[in-house]
C-alpha cells in the first residue's frame, strides 16, 4: 500500500533537472593532523595494526608524488574553481551566491554557458564508482574511526572532497543499488513491496522480480558517449535471465546476482552462482570458498584483479565506466589470509583494510597509466552498517542512530569521497546534501549527456558542488518500502513514521539499534507522526535524540518548509510497479521447484 504524508496526495523531484536460469566547500583538517596508519601492509603484507599517533605515510599510489598542497585561500579556491569551470562550461557565472542555489538554477547556468560557447568541453573522463556493502559512516579514519586503518581512503579524501551529508536512497541493498543505477527513488523504479506497510524488501534467490526493462540504467546511457562498462561484484537487481546486467547496458560482468549468503544444501536451495558475463563459473562455498569459521576468502582479491585488468585494457582505447560493488563487509564478513587478524577491529576491520588496500592499488594504477587526471572516482556505501551483526561482523555508523534497515541517520547516511586530480581541489569538505542517486546524473554530466526527459529523475548533478563549491537546495527523502518515513531539508529532519523492527523480532534477538533506545523514537511498532512529525536539527543533534518542541518557532518554521516540499513530491509521484512482491522457489537459478 502507498501512504500519503501530511494530507497530500499519494508520492518528482524537488529540483529540475541464457546461461543464467551527486555554502562553498570548507577545508578538511590538515593532513598533518591525520593520524593515519603507515601503509607498510599496502601490498598485501599486513603489519601490526598499532600506529603511533599523528603520523602520516603516503599510500603506495602517492609515493614519489607530492601530497596535497597547503589549503588555498578563498581567493585561491575561486581561481582553481574558475579553471575547473572550463569543464562545467562556465567561467564563474551562475546564479548561486551567499546561501546556496537550487539545482534547477545550476542546470540552467551550465546549459546557458554551454550555449554561449564558454569553453570547449574536454574528452569524457573515465568513471569509477566504488560501492561498498553495509559499510558505515564511521568506518574510515577520515570520518573519525579511532584505529585509523584506512590510509588509502583517507589519502583519497585528503586529495579530493569529503561529503559528510551523503545518503543512500534506501536502508537496504537492492533498492539502493537500483536507485544508483537509475537515478530514481525505489518507489519510482519498482524496487519496493506493497505486501506490508513500510516493509523493506530485496532480491533473494526466490524473488520473481528485478529491474524493469522500462528503466534506463547508467551503463546503457553511457554507451551513447562511447563508454565501455563493467560491473565487478554484487548485482542484486534480479537473477532471472531478463534481469542480467549485460541486458541492461553493461558490457562485462564478473560477480554474483546476490550476496554471498550460504552455504546451502543444493537441494532445497542452491548455493549462490558466480558469473563471468553470461557464463556461470561456479558458486559461493564451492568453486569460490568462504570459510565461515575463519572468515577466509579470496573474493576481494579476485574482484581487485578483475578491476585492474579492465582498467589496463580500456584506459588507452575508450572511456570506461567501472562499477566495483564488492561485498566483503556484508555478513558473513570475509578477508583474504594476508589480512586476517591484522585489524584492531576484528574480522570486520580485516575486510575494511583489504578494501582500502584494493582502492589504493586501483588509484596507483590510474597514476601509472597516466589517466588519473582523466578519471573521476567516487567511493560510498549502499546503506548503513548492519548493527544486527554487531559487534563481530558489523561496522560503525559514527554518532548516528541505528543502522541498516531503518530510516534513522545510521541506516542511510554514508561515507562519501570524490577524487579527480586536477579538477577537484584537494582537502575539501562539501556540506552539500548528496544522494547515491546523484552518481547517476553526475556521471551523465561527466559524459556530456543529459538524463532522460520522459521520467522523473531524483539524482542531482553534483559537478557544481564538486568543481565550484556551490551548495544546492534539495530535500532527502527516506523511504522504507512503499512509505515515506522522513524528509530532510537543510539541517532539519522530519519523521512522519518511526519504526525499528517488530516486538516479535526484537524479542528473538533481532535488534537494528543495539544500545540506542530513544524513548518515543526507536519504536518497535509502526508509529504514525504524520499529523505532528518529530523534527530534529541534525547539526546540533546528529543522533536524533532530542526532538524539537512542537511549540517552538523553529519547529513551526521547519514544519512549514518541509510540508511544502513533501506535498510537491507526493503530488507529482507516479509509483512504479512493485517488483519485490512475489516469491517462487521455482525461479531460483538451477534450483528446485516449490514442490521439492
Image (cartoon, rainbow, N blue to C red):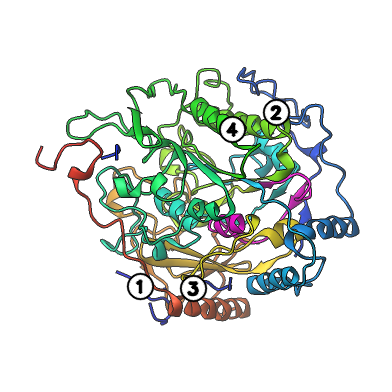
Q: Secondary structure at mark 3?
A: loop
Can residue 498 be seen from the camera position used here? no
Q: Given contact means CB atoms under 8 Å apart, are the residues at marks 4 and 1 in contact? A: no
Q: Position of residue 141 (x, y in %)?
A: 66, 38
Asked whether 223 or 325 is in front, the reply is 223
Position of residue 296 relative to residue 460, above or below, is above
Specify which label sits upstream in the sequence, 4 or 2: 2
Q: Which residues are magenta?
A: 418-444
Looking at the rendered structure, which numbered label has been put on residue 37? 2
Q: Secondary structure at mark 1?
A: loop
Q: CA distance from mark 3 to mark 1?
A: 16 Å
**Label 3 close to label 1 by CB (< 8 Å):** no
Which residue sits furthest left? 595
Circle 4/circle 2 CB separation < 8 Å: no
* Mark found first going from the N terminus, 3 or 1: 1
Horizontal placement of 591 versus 92: left or right?
Answer: left
Residue at the spot 37% in from the left edge and 41% down from the top edge: 257
Does residue 52 appear in the picture of this structure?
Answer: yes
Q: Toward the viewer: 569 or 134?
A: 569
Q: CA distance from mark 2 to mark 3?
A: 44 Å
Q: Is residue 127 above or below residue 54?
A: below
Q: Which residue is mark 1?
A: 3
Q: Nearer the viewer, residue 253 or 341?
A: 253
Location of mark 3 (residue): 12
Distance of mark 1 from mark 2, alpha carbons?
Answer: 48 Å
Q: Residue at x 58, y 25 (%)?
A: 343
Alpha carbon separation for disc pair 4 and 1:
49 Å
Mark 4 secondary-structure assignment:
helix
From the image, state whether disc 4 or disc 1 is nearer to you.
Answer: 4
User: Which quarter of the figure has residue 40?
Assistant: top right
The picture places residue 586, in percent across and down from the top left corner, at 18, 43
Amino acid at each position: 500500500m502507498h501512504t500519503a504524508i501530511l494530507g497530500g496526495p499519494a508520492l518528482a523531484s524537488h529540483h529540475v533537472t541464457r546461461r543464467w536460469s551527486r555554502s562553498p566547500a570548507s577545508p578538511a583538517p590538515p593532513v598533518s593532523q591525520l593520524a593515519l596508519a603507515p601503509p607498510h601492509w599496502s601490498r598485501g603484507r599486513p603489519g601490526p595494526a598499532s600506529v603511533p599517533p599523528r603520523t602520516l605515510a603516503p599510500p603506495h599510489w602517492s609515493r614519489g608524488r607530492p601530497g596535497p598542497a597547503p589549503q588555498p585561500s578563498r581567493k585561491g579556491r575561486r581561481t582553481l574553481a574558475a579553471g575547473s569551470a572550463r569543464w562545467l562550461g562556465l567561467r564563474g557565472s551562475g546564479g548561486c551566491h551567499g546561501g546556496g542555489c537550487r539545482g534547477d538554477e545550476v542546470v540552467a547556468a551550465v546549459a546557458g554557458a554551454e550555449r554561449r560557447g564558454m569553453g570547449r568541453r574536454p574528452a569524457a573522463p573515465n568513471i569509477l564508482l566504488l560501492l561498498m556493502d553495509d559499510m558505515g559512516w564511521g568506518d574510515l579514519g577520515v570520518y573519525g574511526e579511532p584505529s585509523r586503518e584506512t590510509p588509502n581512503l583517507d589519502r583519497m579524501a585528503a586529495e579530493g572532497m569529503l561529503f559528510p551529508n551523503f545518503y543512500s536512497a534506501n536502508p537496504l541493498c537492492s533498492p539502493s543499488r537500483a536507485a544508483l543505477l537509475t537515478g530514481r527513488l525505489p518507489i519510482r523504479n519498482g524496487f519496493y513491496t506493497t505486501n506490508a506497510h513500510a516493509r523493506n524488501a530485496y532480491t533473494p534467490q526466490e524473488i520473481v522480480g528485478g529491474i524493469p526493462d522500462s528503466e534506463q540504467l547508467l551503463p546503457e546511457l553511457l554507451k551513447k558517449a562511447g563508454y565501455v562498462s563493467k560491473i565487478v561484484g554484487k548485482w542484486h537487481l534480479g537473477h532471472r535471465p531478463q534481469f542480467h546486467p549485460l541486458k541492461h547496458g553493461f558490457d562485462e560482468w564478473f560477480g554474483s546476482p546476490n550476496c554471498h549468503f550460504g552455504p546451502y544444501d543444493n537441494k532445497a536451495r542452491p548455493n549462490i552462482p558466480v558469473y563471468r558475463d553470461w557464463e556461470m563459473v561456479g558458486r559461493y562455498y564451492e568453486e569460490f570458498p568462504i570459510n565461515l569459521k575463519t572468515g577466509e576468502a579470496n573474493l576481494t582479491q579476485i574482484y581487485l584483479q578483475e578491476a585492474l585488468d579492465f582498467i589496463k585494457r580500456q584506459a588507452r582505447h575508450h572511456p570506461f565506466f567501472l562499477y566495483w560493488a564488492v561485498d566483503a563487509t556484508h555478513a558473513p564478513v570475509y578477508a583474504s589470509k594476508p589480512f586476517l587478524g591484522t585489524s584492531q577491529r576484528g574480522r570486520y576491520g580485516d575486510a575494511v583494510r583489504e578494501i582500502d588496500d584494493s582502492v589504493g592499488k586501483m588509484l596507483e594504477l590510474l597514476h601509472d597509466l597516466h589517466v588519473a587526471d582523466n578519471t573521476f572516482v567516487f567511493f560510498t556505501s549502499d546503506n548503513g552498517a548492519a548493527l544486527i551483526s554487531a559487534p563481530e561482523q558489523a561496522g560503525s555508523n559514527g554518532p548516528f542512530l541505528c543502522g541498516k534497515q531503518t530510516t534513522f541517520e545510521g541506516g542511510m547516511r554514508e561515507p562519501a569521497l570524490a577524487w579527480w586530480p586536477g579538477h577537484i581541489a584537494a582537502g575539501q569538505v562539501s556540506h552539500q546534501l548528496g544522494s547515491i542517486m546523484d552518481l547517476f546524473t553526475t556521471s551523465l554530466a561527466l559524459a556530456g549527456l543529459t538524463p532522460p526527459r520522459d521520467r522523473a529523475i531524483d539524482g542531482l548533478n553534483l559537478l557544481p558542488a564538486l568543481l565550484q563549491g556551490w551548495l544546492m537546495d534539495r530535500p532527502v527523502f527516506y523511504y522504507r518500502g512503499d512509505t515515506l518515513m522522513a524528509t530532510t531539508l537543510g539541517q532539519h529532519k522530519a519523521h512522519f513514521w518511526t519504526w525499528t523492527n517488530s516486538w516479535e523480532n526484537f524479542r528473538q534477538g533481532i535488534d537494528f539499534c543495539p544500545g540506542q533506545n530513544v524513548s518515543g523514537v526507536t519504536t518497535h511498532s509502526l508509529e504514525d507522526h504524520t499529523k505532528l512529525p518529530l523534527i530534529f536539527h541534525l547539526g546540533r543533534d546528529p543522533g536524533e535524540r532530542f526532538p524539537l518542541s512542537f511549540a517552538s518557532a523553529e519547529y513551526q518554521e521547519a514544519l512549514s518548509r518541509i510540508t511544502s516540499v513533501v506535498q510537491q513530491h507526493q503530488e507529482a509521484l507516479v509509483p512504479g510497479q512493485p517488483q519485490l512482491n512475489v516469491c517462487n522457489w521455482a525461479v531460483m537459478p538451477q534450483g528446485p521447484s516449490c514442490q521439492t
